[in-house]
Image: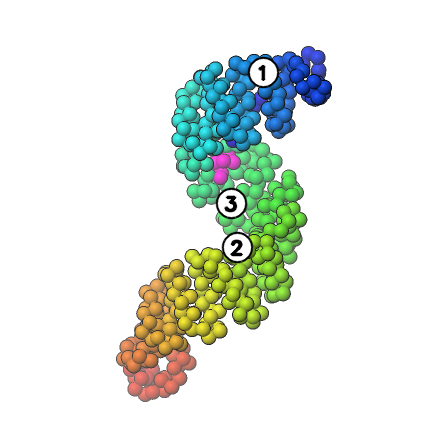
Amino acid sequence: MLDFEFNESEEHPEHSDIRELVADFERRLREDAEAYFEPEMLEEVTGFYMEQGRFEDALLAIDRLLKLYPFAPDAWFRKGVVLNLLDRFEEALEAFEHARSLNPFDSEVLVGTAIALDHLGRRKEALDLFEEAVALDPHNDELIFNWGITLERMGHTEEAIEKFEACARLNPEHPDVWYELGFCYELLGELDKSLACYERQLDIDPYATNAWYNRGIILGRLGRHSEALASYDYALLIQEDFSSAHYNKANTLLQLGQLDEALKHYQEVLKIEGDDAPTYHNMGIIYLEKASHEEALDYFLKAIRTDPEHADTWHELGTCYELMDRMDAALRCYKRAVSLRPYMATFWYSLGDCHYHMDHLEEAIEAYRQVVRLSPNAPEGWIDLADTYTEAGYYEEALKSLHHALRIKPQDGHLYFQEARILFKLGRHEEALEAIRTAFLIDPEQKNVFRRLFPELSKDKGVQKLLGLDS
């Protein structure tokens, strides 16, 4: 949102200290709700309240000013700004319309109106007003910056970048433009450009907590985890209770295997935020890594109690139960996970494995069929589907599934042995031997694997001759 800069309060002729002036205003207002105030006093009090973020109080002072001067465009403009900051956009629009009727060529009024329209979802009208405002004031960097913000909110990222870059050319020291550019480049996946913009923002304002935080995210995505940790540390040095920085630092520590340090920062998140399902979830992951299954179970259950729809936790809870050999409980959790996120192949894979280990072959086949539907280019799903079909006695289906895997991994010699095993069961011995010969062509070392996998067959003299094992 546009932050309009108000002139700093000048020294009042009767009050050298603005705080004294504000105290006098508040005292007189308490004593007499209809008290008269000099216009200059109301303007200075309004400016003070704006600087302090006391927007409701600012609105009170502005309304008093408008009683004295109902045709003052600046007062209506200020009222619109305050109402925008209070998220009262319909009322803001009315105030700006008053200002525009009194001064139709004020570019800042047009921008304020555009911001209100943007928040009301009337973005085409907002963009038209930005065009009109820029025509009036083409070198106003703040105007162009806010045009970029509206485009960014509309999802027009590349167009937003154009405006932010134009703003940066007009004012390279703009307090927020490099941050927004960094965010836009991040959305486009241009991480090096994003990083450069966040660092430029920090050159201007080294205490920009969010810039340090976002810089950490980018460094993490670039695989520069140690630098990411340092960036989160700077953010936390500026703002100790920045829970997102604690959380992301913990995630980075988890990636680096520094489990105990990660736990400390997740605990900080819980101190600041209270119950938080993703934090409990990640703490459960750490205890799984430590093979402390009871502790992992405790944190996963806390996550579920906090957010019963947290699908990832249902999946990990299933994994935890499976490691504890509590298969019925694991199965219930995997079913819950796929019901919440049926498009997740990994969830179906875990459900299939669980059914398979419980000897529920038909149910395992159904789950693996979902895996290959969702991830048709991942060979593992096709291989496990083929294995399960084979075990269930569906040899033709097994062969079809395995051929899908072979199209993806044609140089995997072991898959040809699996094909041969199925072909033997179908009585197609010549094709089976041809599959074995293909495995040998791909990798001669597979001959030793063949002897181990097919001990009886490898002793057959005729087979030895056919496969060239008699030399």
Q: Is residue 439 above or below residue 288?
A: below
Residue at the location (38% across, 82% down)?
Answer: 454
The residue mark sitting in front, 3 or 1, is: 1
Q: Residues within 10 Å of mark 3 (few under 14, many from 20)?
A: many
N-term-proximal mark, 2 vs 3: 3
Q: Is residue 187 above or below residue 444?
A: above
Q: Secondary structure at mark 1?
A: helix
Which segment is the magenta one?
178-183
**Label 2 to label 3: alpha-carbon separation:** 29 Å
Q: Residues within 10 Å of mark 2 (few under 14, many from 20)?
A: some
- x, y (%) of residue 161? 43, 34
Q: Main secondary structure of the magenta part?
A: helix
Q: Which mark is residue 309?
A: 2
Residue at the location (38% across, 86% down)?
Answer: 456
The residue mark sitting in front, 1 or 2, is: 1
- x, y (%) of residue 179? 52, 36
**Label 3 to label 1: alpha-carbon separation:** 52 Å
Name the residue tied to disc 3: 218
**Quadrant, the C terminus:** bottom left
Name the residue tied to disc 1: 67
